Image (cartoon, helix red, strand yellow):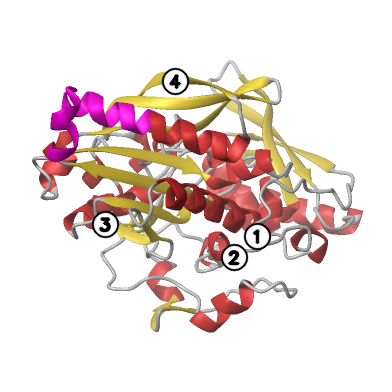
Amino acid sequence: MAVVSSAHSTIFSKTSLFHHINGFKRFSFCLPFSSSAVASLSSKKKWRQPVASSMLELGGIKIAKDDVVRDDPTNNVPDTIFSKLGLQLHRRNNHPLGILKNGIYEYFDTNFPNMFHKFDDLCPVVSVKQNFDDVLVPADHVSRSYNDTYYVDSQTVLRCHTSAHQAELLRRGHTHFLVTGDVYRRDSIDSTHYPVFHQMEGVRVFTPDNWEASGLDPTSYAAEDLKKSLEGLARHLFGAVEMRWIDAYFPFTNPSYELEIYFQGKWMEVLGCGVMEQEILKSNGRSNSVAWALGLGLERLAMVLFDIPDIRLFWSTDERFTSQFSEGQMGVKFKPFSKYPPCYKDMSFWINDSFTENNLCEVIRGIAGDLVEEVSLIDNFTNKKGMTSHCYRIAYRSMERSLTDEEINDLQWQVREQVQNKLNVVLR
């Protein structure tokens, strides 16, 4: 399933799929990391984030940087995003995301032995058809826009949800599968949003032999099995918590639901799910079947389970962070190793008709990277001439060291220059 909520929660969340997307003329390859590199990252030794390379490799297939980052009007993939391709945090067994992924695997392996096939290294460069059309995203949906999705070219994107692989796996004959991977969306800057995050998609297909003896119609049978299965998953991850089901809407399922749990004094959305639309099944050779699908965001759940306060920390190579987590240790609480003070800088400008906040955040990220903690609109007004002014507050803070006034001032100067030049706004 596709979709995500805050902290890029669930594949099926309200903010989920309906926030970003991706496409690319179909490459006959998958993305980065040699098998030796993956093996080294699974060890408990100190690891370093790979330096952005002009060539990536996965499974012996090489991808040049020019294949993804192009001087092309239909391409909006920056170098900073290319540098994240192939890092695959979800495949590191000592990383919170890898620990959570394996914990979910454990639940399905225990309750559905030898039933679910697992995929966690599928190529994140997919076609627009795979990313949107195959999961029935309307042609005019906002998630298809260049403002929300990273396009390699007009027909190819960096996947914005793991649902992009659903149709292909169904056509291959898979009836029970879990797909985990990195997904990409242009987004705002704050403690719960990052342009690269990780999702898990789950699908289970039923045939008439499954539901005919139950006395239920196919849709009711699938929905009942779905709720029972996912309530069990929630208990596996969070313990004996109170749960509730909320009716929802997703273009690829009907009926659709969101599962919420009462955790730490408040209701929290865990995942989105539903009974797969028949059109998807029929289009992929399963016309006499019914299926359920689920989607969840790994970062959102990991932030709660491990008490991780800022989504940027998942990308930290600081040993004070990485050393706190071990394979199989679910829910170990993160101990902050430092809390450096933030530095705030305000910037005001007259916007134009093409201005979007996502474009602003892309420019700021391209200059300051993970040193930017938050970008927030603190004031706006329209004058008598009809010109609109926005004032944004940028919070700079490193997760690992104190920033000097000199480097913050230098970053802010570059931000102001690039915002003016790239977004064609008029600074005030």
Task: Confirm or deny contact between disc 2 and disc 3 (CB under 8 A).
Answer: no
- Say if the magenta span includes residue 213: yes
Q: Secondary structure at mark 3?
A: loop
Task: Decide if residue 6 is on the left or right side of residue 127.
Answer: right
**Mark 4, residue position:** 245
Bounds of the magenta segment: 209-227
Residue that numbered label 3 is attached to: 155
Q: Could you tell me how far apart the alpha carbons at marks 1 and 4 are, in whole angstroms?
A: 30 Å
Q: Which of the 4 image quadrants contains residue 272?
A: top left
Q: Residues within 10 Å of mark 2 (few under 14, many from 20)?
A: many
* Numbered mark located on residue 92 in the image: 2
Which of discs 2 and 3 lies nearer the camera? The answer is: 2
Residue 224: say if magenta: yes
Q: Quadrant of the N terminus?
A: top left
At label 1, the amino acid type is His
Check whether the beta carbons of the residues at disc 1 and disc 4 lie within 8 A of each other: no
Front-lying residue, 357 or 28: 28
Distance in Å between CA atoms under marks 4 and 2: 32 Å
Horizontal placement of 290 versus 88: left or right? left
The answer to whether residue 78 of the structure is visible from this angle is: yes
Label 1 residue SS:
loop
Residue at position x 44%, y 20% in the image: 245
In the image, 426 versus 188, the foreground residue is 188
Disc 3 crowd rating (10 Å Cα; few below 14, some 14-19, many 20+) is some
Mark 3–mark 4 distance (CA, rounded to whole Å): 37 Å
Q: Are marks 2 and 1 in contact (CB under 8 Å)?
A: yes
Quadrant housing residue 133: top left
